[in-house]
Image (cartoon, helix red, strand yellow):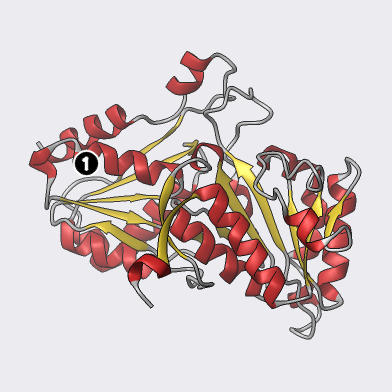
Amino acid sequence: MSDDVMLRECSYREAVREALEQEMLRDETVFLIGEDIGAYGGSFHVLEGLHELFGPERVIETPISEQGFTGVAIGAALMGRRPVVEFMFSDFLAVAMDQIVNQAAKYRFMFGGSASVPLVIRTPSGSGTGAGAQHSQSLEAWFCHVPGLKVVVPSSPHDAKGLLIAAIRDPDPVLFFEQKLLYDTTGAVPREPYAIALGTAAVRTEGCDLTIVTYGRMTALVLTAVSANPLLQGLVEVLDMRTLAPLDMLSVHRSVRKTGRVLIVHEAVRSGGIGAEIASRICEDAVSFAALKAPVRRLCGQDVPIPFSPALESASVPSAADVSQVIDELLF
């Protein structure tokens, strides 16, 4: 089969939809559940056409009750189904925290491994759409704190498809965060199903003087900042974590020991963010700590609710210019 047939350009939105369709065709136990996922196609129209293709028994539209439909999905997972739940916005995960944190995350442990919860919760995340403080947060670090949950944040259409297929096939509950501004981005994606192993980072550019650890929408932003300056070519290594729980610290340590300088970039607020955890693990490793030529730096969202004002919203999260400034401070 030629490369043209195997690969084609598609959007992040289309890649997520294709992963869902292919897994539903492959496995009859996979079903979708959530609000407005029928004829409307989901809050960001990711699911358009799936209701017509699979019918209301496998694309289940629910009332406005996050705790309720999450509980239904957990029960179905315990009975051998593979539900994929859509939350309209990641902020609404707060409404179902008991089901996610105290139920789904705990069952495998509490039943000594004899029960599992193969559940995926997909949700649009992050800022950039002018949706205000209650619809624009990046809450992924909350769930990294909970043993029993896996947390995935894809940065590209290729990774969105491969990581979602892996998440659906996983025996444990997975939180799958899709940054809203990525939905219309495009990239090369194989037509056939494929899985990208959870817990594996990807090196996006190789370098010898600075490691930038990032994920999600910030990956493209960091790559933009690096590519804009010809002086940085070969100096900056960009590591896209892709999965935040479990963390691929082997890849982080390998890069840090090579470059000796680290910048961690994420959109979520600085306090209690995943960047603090990564920085701590770097400093706790004797070899990586000894390799550091400068303190680990973090570039994160401001510790404020996301404003509605477009100008203030943009100022509350890192920009490519912010990344460039910190790179200059670390290297020049």
Secondary structure at badge 1 equals helix
* Residue 26 horizontal/vertical position (percent): 68, 77
Q: Residue at x 66, y 67 (%)?
A: 148
Q: Number of labelled discs?
A: 1
Seen in the image, is 89 located left or right of residue 248? Answer: right
Residue 83, by quadrant, is: bottom right
* Residue 180 horizontal/vertical position (percent): 56, 38
Seen in the image, is 297 located left or right of residue 25? Answer: left
Callout 1 crowding tier (Cα within 10 Å): few <14, some 14–19, many ≥20 = many
Residue 172, by quadrant, is: bottom right
Q: Which residue is mark 1?
A: 226
Seen in the image, is 46 located left or right of residue 119? Answer: left
Q: Is residue 265 visible?
A: no
**Vertically, is 186 above or below 19?**
above
* Residue 254 horizontal/vertical position (percent): 26, 67
* Residue 97 horizontal/vertical position (percent): 77, 49
**Vertically, is 140 above or below 136?**
below
Of residues 299 and 287, the one drawn nearer to the viewer in this rendering = 299
Quarter holding the N terminus is bottom left
Q: Is residue 185 visible?
A: yes
Q: Residue at x 64, y 74 (%)?
A: 169
Say which amino acid is labelled 1. Answer: Val
Q: Residue at x 89, y 62 (%)?
A: 57
Seen in the image, is 206 located left or right of residue 308? Answer: left
Quarter holding the C terminus is top left
Q: Residue at x 51, y 36 (%)?
A: 181
